Image (tube, rainbow, N blue to C red):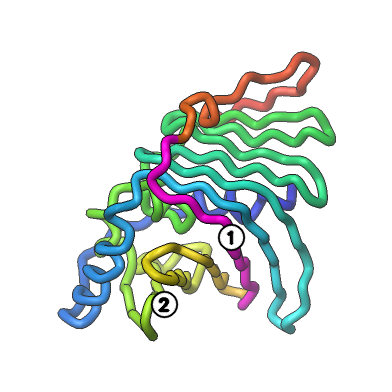
Amino acid sequence: MHYVKHILFTIALSGCMSAQGNDKASDSQQLQALLQPISSLSAQFEQQVIDANGLETQRAAGLLYLAQPNKLRWVVSEPMPQQLISDGQTLWLYDEDIEQVVVQPVDSNIDSTPIMLFSGDLQRLNHTYSVLQTSKGVFELTPKKNDSLFASIRLDFNDKIPTSLAMTDNLDQITRINLTSVSVNREIPADLFTFKIPDDTDVIRND
């Protein structure tokens, strides 16, 4: 399951502290203005994990679907088929190769996590992150909670469309997600955000 491990880590993140500084608030408002109109998003993705020495240690590709509130379908097609699905209440992590699924409740802070910035509660954004716009359409987010798994998060937009997400952890490892064929605010079938456990699948429940 290591190909979706880094995405699962983003869903384990949480944090909530007070906002800082007028300049940061202004940048945060500009980011919120880009995120606010997005009610759903689908895209193809390529994910790279790069270590502190600049070497690529993992690569994966697949499809991503997001919808309000807190719904996710992350389908890895290469190099091994895996799925991460949330209906907003339950999270399924399915590894087809070993016929195993991990089932757990969605954490109450899922909407403050990086990948869910596109489908969570934007009112929490300014409380969870310090936001700096480094150039047009490029934002760097720094978690305000010291025990966050990530040191920084970068969001890139092109013509108001999200194109990439990069997370740097405390060991300087970077998880970069590049988005292509991005579709915003098109209806996504509700059944994409549910998961029917296949027969003969090993089920692990983390309640």
Please tell me whether mark 2 or mark 1 is closer to you in this view.
1
In the image, is residue 185 part of the stretch drawn in magenta? yes
144 left or right of 29 in image: right
Which residue type does callout 1 highlight? Thr
Q: Tell me what residue is drawn at x 56 percent, y 72 percent.
A: 168
Q: Position of residue 9 (x, y in %)?
A: 57, 53
Q: Viewer-proximal residue, 134 or 13?
A: 134
Badge 2: how crowded within 10 Å, few (<14), some, or many (20+)? some
Q: Viewer-proximal residue, 78 or 169?
A: 78
Q: Position of residue 126 (x, y in %)?
A: 25, 64
Q: Is residue 104 above or below residue 10?
A: above
Which residue type does callout 2 highlight? Val
Q: Tell me what residue is drawn at x 51 percent, y 66 percent.
A: 163
Which residue position is annotated with label 2? 138
Q: In terms of secondary structure, where does tag 1 sit?
A: strand
Q: Quadrant of the N terminus?
A: top right
Please, which residue is most extreme toward the left here? 22
Q: Position of residue 89 (x, y in %)?
A: 43, 29
Which residue position is annotated with label 1? 180
Q: Quadrant of residue 71?
A: top left
97 left or right of 132 in image: right
In the image, is residue 174 part of the stretch drawn in magenta? yes
- The magenta stretch is 172-187
Badge 1: how crowded within 10 Å, few (<14), some, or many (20+)? some
Q: CA distance from mark 2 to mark 1?
A: 17 Å
- Tell me whether circle 2 and circle 1 mark residues in contact (CB < 8 Å): no
Q: Position of residue 190 (x, y in %)?
A: 46, 26
Between discs 2 and 1, the one toward the N terminus: 2
Q: Quadrant of residue 200?
A: top right
Q: Tell me what residue is drawn at x 77 percent, y 41 percent.
A: 81
